[in-house]
Amino acid sequence: MRAGEENNRSVYVITHNIVSPLGDTSEENFLALKAGLTSVKKQFDSEIAAEPFMASLFDKDNDFFDQIDEDLTRFERLCMQSITGALSQTSIDIAGNKTLFILSSTKGNISLLETQPESAALNSRVSLNTSAKIIAAQFGFTTKPVVVSNACISGVLAVITAMRLIRTGEYNTAVITGADVISKFVVSGFQSFQALSSDVCKPFDKDRTGLNLGEGAGTIILSADEKYAGNIKVLGGAVSNDANHISGPSRTGEELAGAINHALTDAGKDASSIDFISAHGTATAYNDEMEATALTLAGLQHVPLNSLKGNYGHTLGAAGIIESVISLQSVEQGSLMPTVGYHKNGVTNPVNVCTAETAIDAQTFLKTASGFGGCNGAVIFGK
């Protein structure tokens, strides 16, 4: 590949899969959303929290947790279930030296710290690098796996990372999987921030009181092969950092707006070309306020927008991928899903929140994400 050609190399979406409490395939999940379902409900699990809490969790007797080698952790089995579902729809060369595996997660096997005594073996087992190698070996990937763990933009950043590596010509195909499971460690952390809602969360709503957590996994497979030229592409992406506060988002929204504008430039698009937005929309007071301000700064305040946190909860390292997959289906099926919990504007700069399933003729959409440490991500998909 000649110098300067890398950004001209198209990156196509081959296929995808979602495994969540709403379904084991992308199709099952989309149908559940069309039916108005949410998997967020009151949970009674003393191993995770002393008091009931609202979250989206798998049933403990879910079959797929028992279908793979017992030496694998619950987190790894969840990842593998999603990868298996995606691979069943394609015939890519897993073992080829041009095929990459990327694992996106914020917590991985952190729950092992709650049940096992400290040791060098435990420290290694908790490492996301260990999980990535185990999963890669199970499927027969031969290239070194890549781990992306950057708070709640991990899923979006993993897609951007794959896009960039494919553009360089180093890889032709990428399998990107994002997953997280909920444990006492995770719940107690968000409780310490007083960030959890006692009801189904309400993104961008005046009465929002916090987020819900969720478990899930999503996989997207990307390729530069021109035989997929009719498929939706990853057109561009960018990241930024607020450098503002370890847990509090920017007060101006300029940094997320900057990531959005750089993503638009990378994609060769402008704000007028975005047909809808899959927002981060955590339903926390400060994140929703910042995100709405950023979208306004980027000239996108009137573009139809949804948040899926009221359906899935916040699935952390899986969120950017799960929510992108649902948006890909929205483009393919011409139907934009509503934002569960939204009733009345609750942000200073109002955005166009979708409140009912809406027929759309969309070509291009934007997926945003923000997270602890001030990280922001924006990725653009389109035909």
Image (tube, grey):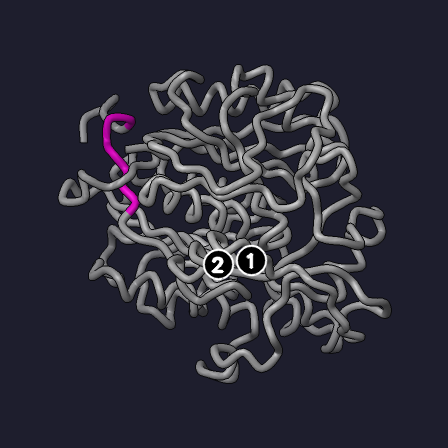
Image-based side of 223 in relation to 148, left or right: left
Is 112 drawn above or below residue 103 in the view shown? below
Which residue corresponds to mark 1? 37
If you read the primary sequence from the N terminus, does the residue marked by circle 1 or circle 2 appear first? 2
Residue 171: image tag = none
Q: Where residue 171 sits in the image (x, y, percent)?
A: 27, 45
Can you say whether 23 is above or below 225 in the image? below
The front one of 42 and 50 is 42
Quadrant in the rendering for residue 272: top left
> For the point 63% across and 45% down, which residue is it?
151
Q: Are marks 1 and 2 in contact (CB under 8 Å)?
A: yes
Give the x, y percent position of residue 14. 27, 49
Residue 8, magenta (yes or no): yes
Indicate whether 154 appears above or below 278: below
Taking the view exactly as shown, the residue that stands out farthest to the left is 227
Report the front residue among 93 and 226: 226
Q: Which mark is residue 32?
A: 2
Helix, strand or loop at mark 1: loop
- Span colored in magenta: 7-13
- Residue 43 in the image: state x and y as whole percent: 73, 68
- Amino acid at dot 1: Leu
Q: Quadrant of residue 135?
A: bottom left
Q: Is 310 left or right of 321, judged from the image as shown?
A: right
In the image, what residue occupies the spot 38% across and 58% down?
27
